[in-house]
Image (cartoon, rainbow, N blue to C red):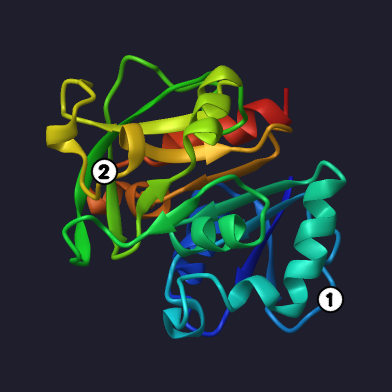
Amino acid sequence: MKFGVITFPGSNCDEDMIYVLESILGQKVERLWHKEHDLKCVDFVVLPGGFSYGDYLRSGAIARFSPIMQEVIKHAENGGYVMGICNGFQILCEAGLLPGALLHNDHQKFMCKNIYMKAQTSDTLVTATLDQDKAYKIPIAHAEGRYYISDEGLAELNANNQVLFRYCDEEGNVSSEVNPNGSLENIAGVTNQGRNVFGMMPHPERAADTALGNVDGKALFDSILAQVSA
């Protein structure tokens, strides 16, 4: 598996992602620049967190028009794997590769803390080997993380089993009290109908190193690698 990690102006989690993929998981990684039109034959594209183009207009709204996004869209349309974390999730929604949108947090504040989330499906690379009864502790850091979609879109997401994660408490209970940003139905991540594009607001790359005292996020990457090597 060859990963490609895109750097946009304002990305600040690209090196974190590269470190986890290369140093912890032992994978090949290509650094991709936002002005390029070459994905360098990668199998799996990652759009990292950060503040692409200063989050002007809306988070991800300008990055969606970066030259490399033309190639990412083609890659996804051809069945290639794409994952967006936080700002990357916002970009994928702006590009139409994932349904819905990320709005300002309902409390209008930037949040940076650990939350708990639980997998909602086993039918994706990212969640296939996760324990659906387990609450995974993963950091969030965002001001525009409130997932929104129309009533029709929400019904379709649920009917098609496209919700990847929901925010929960330490025991795995999903409720409005533990919703950190006002996301509809506590949604923390979704996939497309083709199940090859993934987006989530929590940062698994920030919870994948034993030196940080938390490796819950590594389970997501292990799940990806287990499926592609099976």
What's the distance in space between the residues labelled 1 and 2, CA to CA?
Answer: 36 Å
Q: Is residue 162 visible?
A: no
Quarter of the figure that contains the N terminus: top right
Instruction: State which quadrant residue 112 falls in.
Output: bottom left
**In terms of depth relative to the viewer, which is nearer, 200 or 228?**
200
Judged from the image, the secondary structure of the residue bearing numbered disc 2 is: loop
> Residue sitting at 56 percent across and 73 percent down?
61
Mark 1: amino acid: His
Of the two numbered discs 1 and 2 in the rendering, the one whose residue sits closer to the viewer: 1
Give the farthest residue toward the front: 151
* Residue designated by label 2: 214
The percent position of residue 151, horizontal first and vertical second, equals 47, 33
Residue drawn 69% across and 78% down? 66
Does residue 59 appear to the left or right of 91 in the view shown?
A: left
Where is residue 227, by image quadrant? top right
Q: Circle 1 is placed at which residue position?
A: 37
Precedes in sequence: disc 1 or disc 2: 1
> What quarter of the picture does the C terminus occupy?
top right
Q: Nearer the viewer, residue 27 or 174?
A: 174
Q: Residue at x 82, y 41 (%)?
A: 79
39 relative to 176, above or below: below
Residue kind at label 2, given as amino acid type? Asn
Residue 25: which numbered mark, if any? none
Q: Is residue 158 above or below residue 54?
A: above
Is there any visible trace of residue 204 in the rendered image?
yes
Q: Position of residue 12 (x, y in %)?
A: 43, 75
- x then y, percent, for residue 27: 64, 51
Residue 97 on image: x %, y %: 68, 51
Q: Residue at x 39, y 17 (%)?
A: 132
Could you say whether the residue bearing mark 1 is in a helix, strand or loop? loop
Of 56 and 223, the residue lying toward us: 56
